[in-house]
Amino acid sequence: MVAHAQSAGGLTWTAPAEWAAQGERPMRAATYKIPAAKGDTEAAELAVFYFGQGQGGAVDANVKRWVGQFQTADGKPIPQDKSKTKTEKVNGMPLTTVDVKGTYTGGGPMMGPSTPKPGFRLLGAIVEGSQGAVFFKLTGPEKTVAASEKSFRKLLESVKKQ
């Protein structure tokens, strides 16, 4: 199996070969289906977004919005200290990552599930390239996302300027 190299916003990256590239979708630069881990009934998905230079909103606002798409088991917002956010550099570019678990409620009619999904996790990353930010949002059942964590990290480390 060959890894998939893709690009958006002046950046390229290489997705793991076992992640199936999906067809084009509105507002997305790429979409990958990640096979379900043993014990999970549902696959995970990595959606990659690029809205253009200066578009897509501030990094902090996107991190807050992603965390806001999750709730605790009793339907309350996830406390800020229960999500992990980190800022670092990848190949000389600013990278912000977020990790949150809980009941996934999605981000509106086009962005997420119609029914809340308990036991889900999101790994998100925002790479700030010279042509604007590229957003990587991996969501799925906790086990599947945990099993994909190293591959997701590898994908992020493969991001380079075109």
Image (cartoon, rainbow, N blue to C red):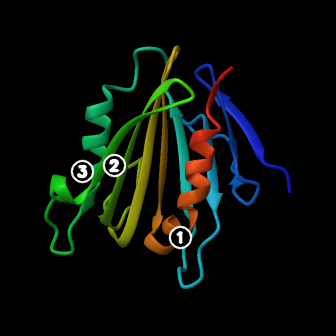
Q: Picture coordinates of residue 147 (x, y %)?
A: 56, 69
Q: CA distance from mark 2 to mark 1?
A: 21 Å
Of marks 2 and 1, the one in the foreground = 1
Task: Identify which residue, 28 or 37, lies in the foreground.
Answer: 37
* Relative height, residue 141 to residue 87 (above, below): below
Which residue position holds label 2?
107
Decide if residue 113 is in sight here. Answer: no
Decide if residue 8 is in sight here. Answer: yes
Q: Is residue 94 left or right of residue 63?
A: right
The quadrant of the image that shows the C terminus is top right
Three-letter residue code for mark 3: Gly
Three-letter residue code for mark 1: Thr
* Relative height, residue 33 to residue 72 (above, below): above
- The residue most toward the right is 1
Report crowding for label 1: few under 14, some 14 to 19, many 20 or more residues within 10 A (C-alpha): many
Q: CA distance from mark 2 to mark 3?
A: 8 Å
Q: Which mark is residue 134?
A: none
Q: In percent of the image, x 47 and y 64: which residue is there?
A: 140
Q: Is residue 1 left or right of residue 52?
A: right
Q: Picture coordinates of residue 123 (x, y %)?
A: 43, 53
Q: Picture coordinates of residue 94 (x, y %)?
A: 43, 27
Of marks 2 and 3, the one in the foreground = 3
Which residue position holds label 1?
144
Element type at mark 2: loop
Report crowding for label 2: few under 14, some 14 to 19, many 20 or more residues within 10 A (C-alpha): some
* Earlier-in-chain disc, 3 versus 1: 3
Task: Identify which residue, 1 or 20, lies in the foreground.
Answer: 1
Residue 64: image quadrant is top left
Which residue position holds label 3?
68
Three-letter residue code for mark 2: Gly
